Amino acid sequence: MSPTKEEIISKLRQEMIRWEGFRAPQPGTSNDLGLGAVAFAFPDGVFPTGAIHEFISNSPENTAASGGFITGLVQKLLSNGGACLWISYTRRIYPPALKLFGVDPDRVIFVDVPLQKDVLWVTEEALKCEGVATVICETKDLSFTESQRLQLAVEKSHATGFILRKDVKKANTTACVTRWQIRPVRSHLRIGMPGVGHPRWQVELLKVRNGKPGNWTIEWKKQSFQTVTAPQIIEPKRRYA
Amino acid sequence: MPKRFASIWFRHLLTDQKAIRQPGLKGKAYVFAEPDHGRMLIMAVTDAARKYGVTEGMTVADARVIAPDLHVFDGKAGRNLKLLTALAEWFLRYTPLVQLDPPDGLLLDITGCTHLKGGEKAYLQEIVARLKAIGYDVRPAIADTIGAAWGVARCATSGLIVPVGEHRNALMPLPPSALRLAMDQLMKLRNLGMHQISSFIYMPNSVLRRRFGKNMVLRLHQALGQEVEYLFPIKEPVPYSERLECLEAIRTRPAIEIALNNLLERLCKRLYGEGLGLRSATLTWYRIDGKNGKITIGTNHASNRVQHLFKLFFNHLDTVAPGLGIELFTLDANKTEPISDKQSELWSAKGGVDSTEVAELLDRVAGRIGTAHINRYLPGEHYWPERTPQANADIKKAPESEWRTDKPRPMQILDKPEPIEAMALTPDYPPKLFIWKGEQHVIVGADGPERIEREWWLEPGEHRDYYVAEDEAGRRYWLFRSGHYNAENNQHWYLHGFFA
């Protein structure tokens, strides 16, 4: 029985995805990063590891939110072993906070590059390295050519790269697999409770190769991502006193 | 093999050097003088001047009276040390262990070196002949101990090579000044009529110590070899070092790379055989025109892999300026460490922070941006937020305590808290709104206060009351008030961080 037209097309699609640098997870390793509903936006429903992800932020508050989201992802990536490098030009990340998102701060190597032009050089070297699991790079600019170089580096080493772009005026085209924008939103507590609740973000997947972009509200609770599905009724202005 | 030491006495160190500089002065009567208590004291004298009766310690005015055609030059303090250091480096061709012996001598450990020149006699003859050709008048001596060699060089006129085990007999007829004693001890000995070492060498130690002090007994024992005396060489020998002398001067980049690779292969082979790895190494090149330069690299991990070390040097090879050509390369291993065995790493699928690949990556990065910019953080035993993470460059060190998770800590922190304008209604309550960089944030939810006292034993200052505050847009901030609430005074509110 010859395969139907649909089967041939879906098979070709799978192969095209593979040629574009996306790899199916190796058997025996779990690639579930605990993203829940968000994971269905990716091809095959699996978060693409061994690729470059781009996060866009234009204010320190958004950078902090993106940092939290990335750290939550890194937590799972580091469970298979390997080192994590945090490369930045002007670093403001506060190491003890990583523990709140499940990453041991002493497992992360912070590279504070004194010259901005060296940031991408260090990132590329780190992504080429076999023993490195993830690299987080804080930078401002990333041209198309530079992103292509990084993507080629990870295709050899299977490391996962996160590019956190701060103060982005205009988002140019890059060769990254995804582009995200994370914004903090009002946290939610039980009615009548004062204070600040769990970190909650508006996660926008602006671009994803071979997937479906989307928009979710996600909360970090009990050391994992929780997708907030039903739109919450915003209660009237709360008094904490 | 018994130890053999040589003492080289430069009889007229300063004046000989002057004659080398100004050949016209050779054989003339001249002295060096230095000001001392408002008069000029003579520090160094030539043989010709000595014939008139001029000696060290005389004032220039007195000397001028007895020797009218005396030339007087200004002496410079510390000049002899400079000269001796240069001469000591010259002596490295005869032995690797040379010690300065101020004011006018050098001490050499020549154990196992003399056969290269055909015996001790030929060794000394060559030294004397070569120094004489340059213009220095020296008196050397060889003996089993440093003290004996020193004494024989200065006080004996013949028998400058003391055979093995004969140093006691050689010392016997010498005056007490051969023992490196202080002037007051020598005076005392002379007053007592002891003109030779043999006249007091048999006295019991306790008597000598009571009469002349501890120093005298020590010096005597050192000269006789009953007390150990060590030599402090001017240049510490590097245990792992390789040299590559080029037949023809090298000028091109590929040739330099080949030379470096060659040196590294030889050094690493040696280190590998002994189970060691490099932590720090220096490549030095010597150019034909006498200039030289060096590159130093350091590693995180003891390593003896040629490719890796080559890559570390490779990043700096641009700084090599061969000029007319390089004739000699040396590679010194400044620091070596035992290399940990690799077996344990086979088990982990992907090495951790301290795997070899990561260590080599960090070496490459450190070669470009410097070691100081690569850090790990360990939990510090401090409450003060700035001190809680402790920078630690050591990749392998494990944390001694747990990271605390019971208090909220921001994802991003400002190096320096930024002052904000805040409005708080009542003491101990978070502000209702604050203005940062011209933007107004209305606070709708807040946690706190968390008071953090300043660590007064480290620095003075006010405590801080921290609040986690969330504004209308859902942005979360870490604010604090410095010091106590004070209704009259302006409140000092600061923004310190951003929560995720």
Image (spheres, helix red, strand yellow):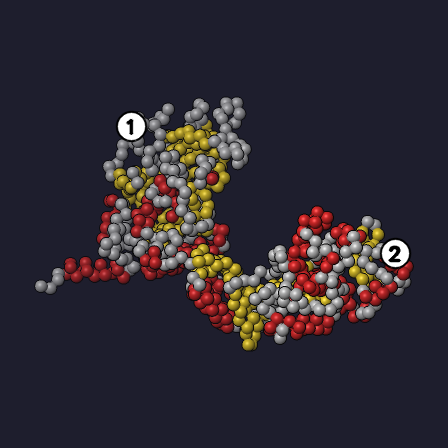
**SS label for mark 1:** loop
Mark whose residue sits in front, 2 or 1: 2
Q: How many marks?
A: 2
Q: Quadrant of residue B365?
A: bottom left
Q: Nearer the viewer, residue B197 or B46?
A: B197
Query: Separation of disc 2 and disc 1 at Cα?
Result: 104 Å
B317 up-or-down from B500: above or below: below
Q: Residue at x 47, y 39 (%)?
A: B386
Q: Outermost residue toward the bottom? A: B247
Left or right position of B494 against A227: right
Label drawn at residue A191: 1
Q: Neighbour class for label 2 at 10 Å: few (<14), some, many (≥20)?
A: few
Q: Residue at x 78, y 52 (%)?
A: B192
Give the amino acid type for the residue marked by disc 1 in the picture: Ile
Q: Say whether residue B483 is left or right of residue B125.
A: left
- For disc 2, the chain is B
Q: Give the image location of residue B493, x and y in percent.
A: 48, 31
Q: Amino acid at mark 2?
A: Ala
Which chain contains the residue that carries disc 1?
A
Would you place residue A236 above or below residue A184 in this image? above
Determine whether, in the image, residue B86 is placed left or right of residue B183.
left
Q: Give the side of residue B26 with respect to residue B365, left or right.
A: right
Q: Nearer the viewer, residue B333 or B444?
A: B333
The residue at the point 82 percent across, 69 percent down is: B27
**Can residue A88 be seen by looking at this rendering?**
no
What SS does tag 2 mark? Answer: helix
Choose top left, top right, bottom left or bottom right for residue B341: bottom left
Q: Looking at the picture, does residue A203 appear above or below residue B199? A: above
Q: Please name the residue that numbered disc 2 is placed on.
A: B61
Quarter holding the N terminus of chain B is bottom right
Horizontal and vertical percent position of residue B81? 70, 59
